[in-house]
Image (cartoon, grey):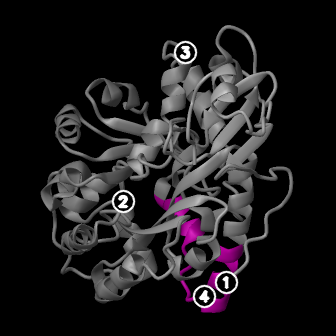
Amino acid sequence: MIIAVSTSDELQRAYPGAEITDAGDGVLLPGLVNAHVHLELSALTPGEPPGRFVDWIKRLVPRSPVSADVVAEFARRGVATGVSQCLRFGVTSVGDISRQCGVTRPLLKRGPLRVVSYGEVQAMANRRGLLEERVAAAVDGKDNSDRLRAGISPHAPYSVEMGGYRRCLEAARERGLPLATHLAETADEAPFLAKHEGPLRELWEYLGAWDDAVAAFAGGPIRFAHAVGMLEYPTLLAHVNYCDDHEMALLAAGRASIAYCPRTHAYFGHPPHRWREMLRVGINVAVGTDSCASSPDLNLVDDLRLLRQLAPEIPALALWELATVRAARAIGMETRVGTLEAGKAADFVVFSASGNDPLATVLESETLPKQVWIAGEPVQISCQITVHDS
């Protein structure tokens, strides 16, 4: 861990026997934090942008059952690819959404990344009977370690009913677990919640799993989360691409954080995100990459670079905070990572940069990290990482 932060001269006087590593001309940052990623989907590629969000989901969700062995192998390959990409791009901590957490957690529990593993729960309509089984899998802490912490994630308001959301929140509160959900990702959520109509109802018909016992909710997904009580818990809300002024006020009055995924947002062609307004009213906003099914890769800095283009008036330092201190807070790791200060993990990333504002220089170039350190040890970032089952 970091034991002191100061100038090199002062540190050499205080610790005369310390080994010195000179990172050269550049900028030293905390290891980057990807607040929202699906590592197990890292073997996928986005393909052409879909006409509709539901059409993209249909690409990912098979109608016919797939064997557990095939699913597990797909997740293993995805995790290995995803971890390698994270390290290459300077990411040392992640908020990982995992539908296959029984497969991914044993692979991730010994590192190299620091992971909050949100076990994903889907249980609606004819699949609501799976709720308790999936909650139990999500909250299972047998793989918790210094590098991995279990959390829980009811997937979205179009795949988990209100009772299921309340059960997930209850489980998180009872165990003090991190909680996340996808919320207001698509404009289709509000009509689905209110009248069970639109493309998301079409999706359920496509899956052959709908029933009419699903209760309606007329207020839209953010008010739905407020009614459940999730906004009063330090919940990570992924996306929040659709948000009116009243909903903004609900978010500002609560404890939830937003994980905005700029390149995924652009891929789907959503209207401009209100992240700047969210920051102004005191909402904690972080950046994430989402998955390789909707983003070219897991290069979190490229998401910051897109924001630099969209909002050149925002200081570079404020943008980097979205991938460091704010992202750490969003996944409940702010006491361990996200800033360079004594008592926190010695996780660093070094970029070559110069000039009066090296933070801006990195965002206005295509440079990759030249060094990544985790727990005080340099990490090989130019080779493929193999994640071994334990």
Distance from label 1 to label 3 (Cα)? 46 Å
Q: Which residue is outermost to the right?
A: 383
* Residue depicted at x 56% and y 20%: 316
Looking at the rendered structure, the kind of residue marked 4 is Val
Counting from the top left corner in percent of width and height, residue 341 is at: 51, 36
**First to last magenta residue range:** 54-76
- Foreground disc of the pair 3, 4: 3
Distance from label 4 to label 1 (Cα)? 25 Å
- Foreground disc of the pair 1, 2: 1
Distance from label 3 to label 4 (Cα)? 46 Å
Helix, strand or loop status at disc 3: loop
Which SS does the magenta portion mostly show? helix
Counting from the top left corner in percent of width and height, residue 51 is at: 54, 50
Q: Quadrant of residue 29?
A: top right
Q: Which residue is mark 1?
A: 390
Looking at the rendered structure, the kind of residue marked 3 is Pro
Q: Which residue is mark 2?
A: 181
Q: Which residue is mark 3?
A: 312
Q: Which residue is mark 4?
A: 66
**Of the image marks 2 and 4, the number of the one nearer the N terminus:** 4
Helix, strand or loop status at disc 4: loop
**Of the image marks 3 and 2, the number of the one nearer the N terminus:** 2
